[in-house]
Amino acid sequence: MSYYTIGSIVKSSAPILFLTSFIGLFAGQIMNSNLDSLISNPILLLLIPALIKIGGDTGSMLGARLASAFHMGLGTTRIHKNPVVRNSLIAAFIVGIVASCFLSVVVWIVGMIVYNGIEFTTLFTISVLACLIELVIVYTVTVVVAVASHKFGLDPDDTVIPIIATIGDVVGISAIFGVIALLKFF
């Protein structure tokens, strides 16, 4: 039985937290480079934090479930056919999509009260498409990081959640502005 010490936890977590700090700065720069879109649609300032948290939080939830499965020895063989991984992915995906739909309704209502608002269909499209893109990428990275962490002897609890929360921010922000650019194109 292995015991965790403060030193071993800090030693394994510090490089990952250092890396995620820089990735978080990159997410801020993406927002800064799209300042014009934020000024022209201030309702996005309500949508962005909540939408990027959907991907990061559900990805972290998925990562925690996978870490628990790996600790119990349930998720280490044939990852692509493993029912624990499959069911965890499906559950996290359902939670993410439902939260995205609910978020679009709440942001639209607040937008109608506080601001002239935005068409519901446009806001719903931005929210759901950006969330779909974010969830696919974040969940893929979650599975890869969880499996790699377990394979290389790192504790998935110490690696997956910080990495996925940060990747969720970058991918979520990129997906939102990508969908907005795509909608302006059509």
Image (tube, grey):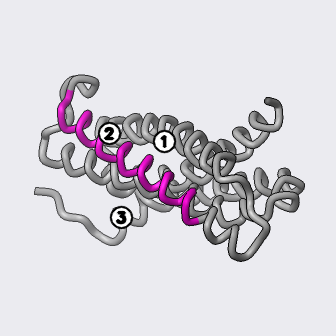
Instruction: Determine the secondary structure under disc 1.
Output: helix
- The amino acid type, in three-letter code, at marker 1 is Leu
The answer for how far apart the CA atoms under marks 2 and 3 are is: 28 Å
Determine the residue positioned at 18% across, 48% down. 71
Q: Amino acid at mark 3?
A: Ile
Query: Residue at 74% across / 57% down in the picture?
Result: 118
What residue did someone put label 1 on?
Answer: 135
Left or right of 135 in this view: 107:
right
Quadrant position of the C terminus in the picture: top right
Residue under the image location 49 percent in, 61 percent down? 14
Q: 78 left or right of 114?
A: left
Whichever of callouts 2 and 1 sits on the residue coming sooner in the sequence is 2
Residue 9: assigned label? 3
Q: Nearer the viewer, mark 1 or mark 3?
A: 1
Q: Mark 2: which amino acid? A: Leu
Q: Nearer the viewer, residue 132 or 67?
A: 132
At horizontal 69% and vertical 75% (from top left) the residue drawn is 113
Which range is magenta? 82-106
Reading the image, the residue beneath label 2 is 89
Q: Is residue 85 magenta?
A: yes
Which of disc 3 and disc 2 is earlier in sequence?
Answer: 3
In the displayed image of the protein, which residue is found farthest to the left?
A: 1
Report the Cα–Cα distance between label 2 and label 1: 10 Å
Judge by depth and name the residue closer to the eye, 57 or 120.
Answer: 120
